[in-house]
Image (tube, helix red, strand yellow):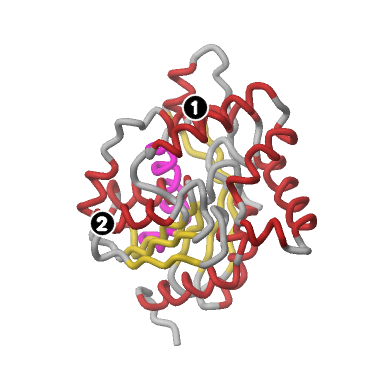
């Protein structure tokens, strides 16, 4: 899979990406905290077959993209892993690929990056899908991520994954006969995409935004917006998406039944169908 490297104030940053499809509007899939681009493998081919040019990539600090540690400078670490830098990485990648405008689909942390991109670079966004995310650092987010941070300090990532898992998948998945198989695949994916240090400091970067003004700034978003939630999501429950919709009244809102925080994995068929329908409705290059 190819790499893209750009110069930044912190030195060169390499972003690893993949592409599927050769025609139609560009779609960038932006993964969540603890994930990497492989989290989108159940969306990559279906979206490409629907007529889109689909890109997945590892955000800085995850997967095969640059992982930098600042063990003696927490302030620098928080700045390095800021959402603002994530946005600039995305825009630089689009520039490198010659993509003037794209649809953005972000889940969880990727939903935050998507919102920030709509605010900072609205003309680069055709439409935005924000899944299982939030626009305000609600108390549950602050408390749960603090617990995750402590887990990263005291456990290996393999051990800490079992602390994270109940927050990620819905009740129906735990009861599924396929659970052990899915559990093994998810654990392998998470361990491969992370280091304790980078994960912990990405959490700190998000937690540092406790007094953030995102909820005020997204009121100015004019791009077509789709909000997706999961009825069993205990980390970012549907009321968080409803709150975001109150700030962006023109946004569409869909709650998928019986899925948790990782709706892209809990019920990929439902997720893909909803997203493809929305993308086709707002496509520049219309698809039959």
Name the spot of residue 226 as percent of width and height, x first: 37, 64
Question: Residue 79 location, x and y as percent?
Answer: 42, 26
In magenta, the rendered stretch is: 83-104
The single residue placed furthest to the left in the displayed view is: 220
Which quarter of the image is occupied by the C terminus? Answer: bottom left
Secondary structure of the residue carrying numbered label 2 = helix
Residue, x 53% and y 38% (percent of image)?
60
- Residue in front for this viewpoint, 207 or 70: 207
Residue labelled with disc 2: 246
Within-10-Å neighbours for mark 1: few <14, some 14–19, many 20+: few
On the image, the x and y values in percent for residue 256 come to 50, 67
| Circles 2, 1 touching at the beta carbon (< 8 Å) | no
User: What residue appears at the point 63 percent right and 57 percent down from the top-left corner?
Assistant: 171
What's the CA distance linking mark 2 and mark 1? 40 Å
Q: Does 220 sit above or below residue 214?
A: below
Q: Main secondary structure of the magenta part?
A: helix
């Amino acid at each position: 899979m190819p790499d893209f490297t750009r110069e930044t104030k912190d030195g060169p940053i390499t972003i690893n990406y993949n592409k599927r499809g050769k025609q139609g509007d560009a779609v960038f899939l932006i993964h969540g905290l603890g994930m990497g681009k492989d989290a989108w493998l159940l969306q990559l081919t279906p979206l490409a077959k629907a007529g889109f040019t689909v890109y997945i990539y590892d955000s800085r600090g995850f997967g095969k993209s640059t992982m930098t540690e600042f063990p003696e400078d927490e302030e620098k670490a928080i700045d390095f892993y800021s959402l603002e830098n994530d946005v600039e990485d995305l825009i630089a990648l689009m520039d490198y690929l010659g993509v003037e405008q794209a649809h953005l689909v972000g889940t969880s942390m990727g939903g935050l990056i998507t919102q920030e991109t709509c605010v900072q670079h609205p003309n680069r966004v055709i439409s935005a899908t924000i899944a299982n995310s939030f626009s305000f650092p609600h108390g549950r987010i602050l408390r749960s991520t603090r617990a995750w941070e402590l887990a990263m300090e005291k456990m290996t990532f393999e051990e800490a994954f079992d602390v994270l898992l109940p927050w990620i998948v819905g009740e129906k998945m735990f009861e599924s006969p396929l659970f052990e198989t899915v559990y093994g695949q998810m654990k392998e994916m998470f361990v491969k995409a992370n280091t304790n240090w980078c994960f912990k400091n990405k959490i700190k970067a998000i937690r540092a935004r406790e007094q953030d003004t995102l909820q005020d700034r997204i009121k100015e978003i004019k791009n077509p917006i789709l909000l997706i939630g999961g009825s069993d999501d205990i980390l970012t429950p549907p009321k968080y998406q409803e709150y975001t919709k109150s700030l962006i009244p023109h946004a569409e809102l869909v709650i998928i039944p019986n899925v948790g925080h990782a709706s892209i994995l809990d019920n990929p068929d439902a997720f893909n169908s909803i997203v493809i329908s929305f993308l086709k409705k707002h496509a520049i290059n219309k698809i039959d």
